[in-house]
C-alpha cells in the first residue's frame, strides 16, 4: 500500500487517471468478424482459364462459398470483414469476391476478382412488382376464420357438403 501511495504522490493522480482511461478505451474497441474464406493469391494464380477444370479448382481452392442461382457453372469464393455496431446493423468493413466461370465442359472460362469498392448499392422499388393477393383490413383479419371450422365433424376443418 505504501508503494501505491508513493507512486500516486510522485507521479500524480493525472498519470493514474490516464492509465485507467487507456485501459477502459482498449476494452471498448469493436472486434472485426471475418466471414468466409478467400483463397490465397498463390493458389488463385494456379487457376488458368482454358485449362483448369472443376476438380482441380476444388482441389486448389476448396468448395466455393456459393454457386450462382441460375447458372451452376459460376462459383463464388466470398470473404467479408464485418464490425458489429451496438444495436444497429453491422458495418461492412471489407469484402472480396472471386467469381470463377466454367464452360459447358467444366473448364475455367473466366476468373474475376471484385472488392468492396466495386460494389453498387441497389435500392428495390416497392411499386415496381406488386405482390399477389389482396390486402385484408384489420377487421377482416380478426374475424376471418369465424365460421370456417365445424366442431361437429371432427374429421375435417370445413363444413361438409355431403
Image: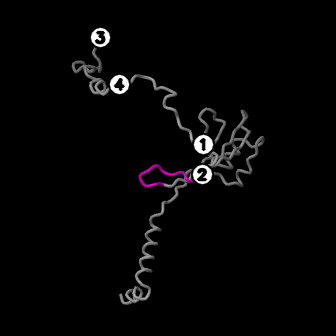
Within 10 Å of the Cα at label 4, are there few (<14), some (14-19), or many (20+) other Cα atoms? few
Q: Earlier in the sequence, mark 2 or mark 4?
A: 2
| Residue 85: percent from left, percent from top | 46, 54
Within 10 Å of the Cα at label 1, are there few (<14), some (14-19), or many (20+) other Cα atoms? few
Q: Earlier in the sequence, mark 2 or mark 1?
A: 2
Q: CA distance from mark 3 to mark 4?
A: 27 Å
Q: CA distance from mark 1 to mark 4?
A: 36 Å
Residue assigned mark 4: 136
Residue assigned mark 3: 161
Could you say which quadrant of the image residue 148 lies in?
top left
Q: CA distance from mark 1 to mark 3?
A: 57 Å
Q: Nearer the viewer, residue 30 or 99?
A: 30
Q: Is residue 159 above or below residue 94?
A: above
Q: Secondary structure at mark 4?
A: loop
Q: Residue at the far top: name it.
A: 162
Q: CA distance from mark 2 to mark 1?
A: 22 Å
Amino acid at each position: 500500500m505504501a508503494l501505491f501511495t508513493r507512486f500516486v504522490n510522485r507521479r500524480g493522480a493525472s498519470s493514474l487517471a490516464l492509465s485507467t482511461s487507456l485501459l477502459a478505451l482498449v476494452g471498448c474497441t469493436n472486434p472485426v468478424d471475418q466471414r468466409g474464406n478467400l483463397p490465397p493469391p498463390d493458389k488463385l494464380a494456379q487457376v488458368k482459364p482454358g485449362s483448369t477444370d472443376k476438380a482441380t479448382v476444388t482441389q486448389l481452392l476448396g468448395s466455393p462459398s456459393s454457386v450462382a442461382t441460375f447458372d451452376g457453372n459460376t462459383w463464388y469464393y466470398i470473404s467479408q470483414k464485418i464490425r458489429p455496431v451496438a444495436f444497429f446493423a453491422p458495418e461492412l468493413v471489407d469484402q472480396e469476391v472471386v467469381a470463377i466461370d466454367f464452360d459447358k465442359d467444366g473448364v475455367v472460362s473466366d476468373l474475376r476478382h471484385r472488392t468492396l469498392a466495386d460494389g453498387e448499392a441497389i435500392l428495390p422499388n416497392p411499386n415496381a412488382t406488386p405482390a399477389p393477393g389482396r390486402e385484408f383490413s384489420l377487421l377482416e383479419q380478426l374475424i376471418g376464420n369465424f365460421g370456417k371450422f365445424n366442431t361437429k365433424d371432427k374429421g375435417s376443418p370445413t363444413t361438409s357438403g355431403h
